[in-house]
Image (spheres, helix red, strand yellow):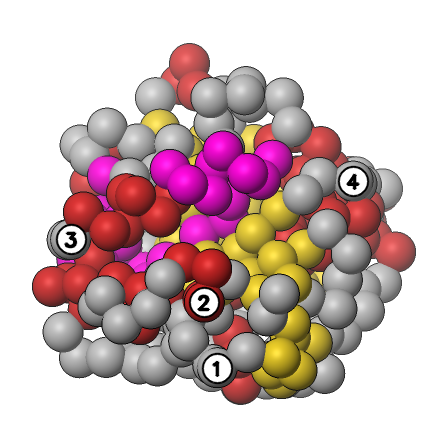
Amino acid sequence: MNKLEFTRFQGLDYACKEAINTLCTNLTFVGNEKRVIMVTSTQAHEGKSFLSMNILRTMAQLGKKTVLVDCDLRRSQVSAKYGVHVLAGTGYGTAHYLAGMCSLNDALYETSIPWAYMIPVGREVSNSLALLSTPRLKQMFSYLSERFDFVIVDAPPVGVIIDAAEIAKSCDGTIFAVKYNSVGRRELLEAKRQIMRTGCAVLGAVLNEVDLDALSSKKYYNRSYYSNYYSDYYKPTSDQAKVRRVSSDESDQ
């Protein structure tokens, strides 16, 4: 089988690890019919790829066979950010499969993390919507959902290009990465409505880059869903920021 490794996958501090653990545990309770989970944001630089990658790693550590599909066909940061290095395979990925240039098995890689698999972007393209609107996208997710416990889809921001809404049509649920004090309520609600119009459920949101120093440590710091976080979309950074896990029941939708 094709194999790859992550050469720059940084560890998490205790609080951040517990936050991601809580999120992944909650995802195991959303139901067996919710296997294909899209991770997106409203804008760029909100940490959605960091979230996708750490859901992949944590789910695998929990014993869940999980695959990450990089569907950010125009400006993926995953391979560069996490040092994706192909050990065995041709380098095919999502773009190649959607274009009919390879089989799905040619684009699927076993990673250096046990139980974690990945379909990298392969190559960036300018005509991403044309590829994402083909029947091959739904066929890919259907095939993977029958063979994996979870399929995590790293998608572009909803408010930047239409790609995320097209991807959502073939997904079971969506998680939003939301940068604290950056996205307006109206903008976030419109992004939520745009996803829900596709028929894809909005499962919740992760609020990140919360400045805990500006809040009451007694009131907030002891909550296990606060932690340090990286904001990693389009903007390379090594500085940790703060994260808060905010859950949303499907009944609120």
Using the image, determine if residue 3 lies above or below residue 42. Answer: below
Q: Does residue 214 appear in the picture of this structure?
A: no
Task: Kindly report the distance in space between the C-alpha atoms of the residues bearing marks 4 and 1.
Answer: 28 Å
Which structural element holds mark 4?
loop
First in residue order: circle 3 vs circle 4: 4
Residue wearing tag 2:
106
Q: Position of residue 8 (x, y in %)?
A: 71, 82
Kind of residue at disc 3: Thr
Mark 1 surroundings: few (<14), some (14-19) or many (≥20) residues within 10 A:
few
Which residue is at the front of the view, 215 or 110?
110
User: Residue sitting at 47 percent across and 21 percent down?
Assistant: 33
Mark 1–mark 2 contact, CB under 8 Å? yes
Mark 4 surroundings: few (<14), some (14-19) or many (≥20) residues within 10 A:
few
Mark 3–mark 2 contact, CB under 8 Å? no
Query: Which of the 4 image quadrants contains residue 202?
Result: top left
First in residue order: circle 4 vs circle 2: 4
* Of labels 1 and 3, the one closer to you: 1
Residue wearing tag 4:
63
* Span colored in magenta: 142-169
Of the numbered discs in the image, which one, if any, rests on residue 90?
A: 1
